Image (tube, helix red, strand yellow):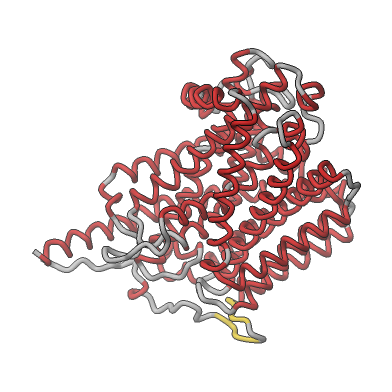
Amino acid sequence: MEPVKDKYSIDNTDYTVGQDNVQKWGFDVHNPVFGISAGAIILFLVALLVADSETAKAALDGMKWKVLGNFDGFFMWSANLFVIFCFALIVSPYGKIRLGGNDAKAEHSNLSWMSMLFASGMGIGLMFWGVAEPVAYFTGWYETPLGVEAHSPEAVKLALGATIYNWGLHGWAIYAVVALALAFFTFNKGLPLSIRSIFYPLLGDRAWGWFGHVVDIIAVLATLFGLATSLGLGAQQATSGINHVFGTDGGIGMQLVVIAVVTALATMSVIRGINGGVKLLSNINMVVAFGLLVFVAIAGGMAGIKAIPTALMGYIENFIPLSNPHGRDDETWMQGWTVFYWAWWISWSPFVGMFIARISKGRTIREFMVAVLFIPTTVIVIWMAIFGGIAIDQVVNKVGEIGINGLQDITLSLFHTYDALPMSSILSVVSIVLILVFFITSSDSGSLVIDSITSGGKVDAPVPQRVFWAVIGGAIAAVLLWVGGTESIQALQAGTVSMALPFTFILLLMCLSLLLGLRTENQLMKLESSTSQ
């Protein structure tokens, strides 16, 4: 039998990892990517300081709504396709392929691996939206899903189901596509841990040229701006919580202190590396989050527990109607929530995808896909049902601040729900700590990812580089809040979402490129097994 050539391996290219790098001042950076990314960020910060934040927000909001309104069907069908693609891989023969080769061993225990998945990809969102989003859908705060009548019994099921839909399989399928493609081409083909490597089957050596530079630069900027946005929003939520619990009146000053503390701790975590930093924090976070969930479920009586089957049925029954972008009566809701979420997930996919790739060596594709799709979705069903169910129950029975006045300040919605529960102060303090630690793990994993891309795909780049990116992320968030507060944060979010449009095309090409790579891997595995017999 003629040997099968592994044509997508690093062995078939003259390129070596880090060949375009510049070593200076303790840094080891890929010159075009690092230089242009850093330059773009400096220009952005200068523009922020000069421009009027309200004008910037209005301009970027206009662009965001044009993207979401004109390309809503494209985003919706792309997300559906990613789910189908991931399910197809689970049941296909490719599912047996092991990331890193047949002899590769998993570097992290199942529990630590899942904890890191959870902490990097969604921990922040659960704390911010766990109460606010189901209540928003139930009350019609900004339209209702599928045009259901607000405050009706059907609205309870649909509010919980639609929340899980926006946080469940579709979003994680987007992350899974990027993560699997990166892990496969890095660990099985020996290519650099960088977004451009995924396109080697389609572009060959041109992937190391300007197309690759542009893709990596977009990934760096999307990651950094997405991270800065979340840091800013998290600082606002943590400050609101601190003011609420301790009766303080901290404003922008306290938000900047929160960002400074988070950035300092993230920097320490970055210095310690994955095992001593983000892995340890993720494990602690998982335990604390689980404890909080159990306590809230008990404190809320049966409202949270009863909501779990309601939420699950709401998700399953409405999965196809919510996935269909055509002929919808709730187009405004769909664009403002679901399409926005798909764009946000896509803009975050380089960051979360690369982090998941880094920690997933040694897993089979089937094991990888099942874990990345179903474990977070299961957590989301339980979390959103308990927190959302209790909050909706308070609205129905007009209990507490959120029950009487509804959603007023989203940053306080979680703490208003706690006020009507026993031991509310303790719950609030634990939640503030949890929010801060989630931000530390996100900032830490984000810095590791950006560092990998800007160092030409190296995973062992010098520590000062990682520190540099951790500090930059915090600095952007701080400048945003200092200059324009919420307007600036929302402007950056709108800009980040708009970047998701070109990146969706890149993701679709990733699927094709990954299939080409998997096909050669399958051929090699068959050859190896036939020669070993």
530 to 130, vertically: above or below: below
Instruction: Note whether residue 40 is visible.
Output: no
> Dividing the image into 4 quarters, which one contains the N terminus?
bottom left
Q: Seen from this angle, which residue lies furthest front?
A: 423
Residue 392 image offset from top left, x and y in percent: 67, 23
Specify whether 65 is left or right of 520: right
Q: Which residue is drawn at 55% across and 50% down?
A: 286
Residue 382 image offset from top left, x and y in percent: 53, 34
Q: Residue at x 58, y 79 (%)?
A: 462
203 to 496, vertically: above or below: below
Specify whether 514 is left or right of 341: left
Instruction: Note whether residue 265 is visible.
Output: yes
Closer to the camera in the image, 196 or 286: 286
490 to 390, vertically: above or below: below
Residue 157 image offset from top left, x and y in percent: 57, 20
Q: Which residue is drawn at 33% across and 48% down?
A: 366
Closer to the camera in the image, 441 or 297: 297
58 to 284, vertically: above or below: above
> Dividing the image into 4 quarters, which one contains the C terminus?
bottom left
Q: Residue at x 81, y 49 (%)?
A: 239
Residue 235 image offset from top left, x and y in percent: 77, 51
* Total residue callouts: 0
Identify the image quadrant of residue 34. bottom right
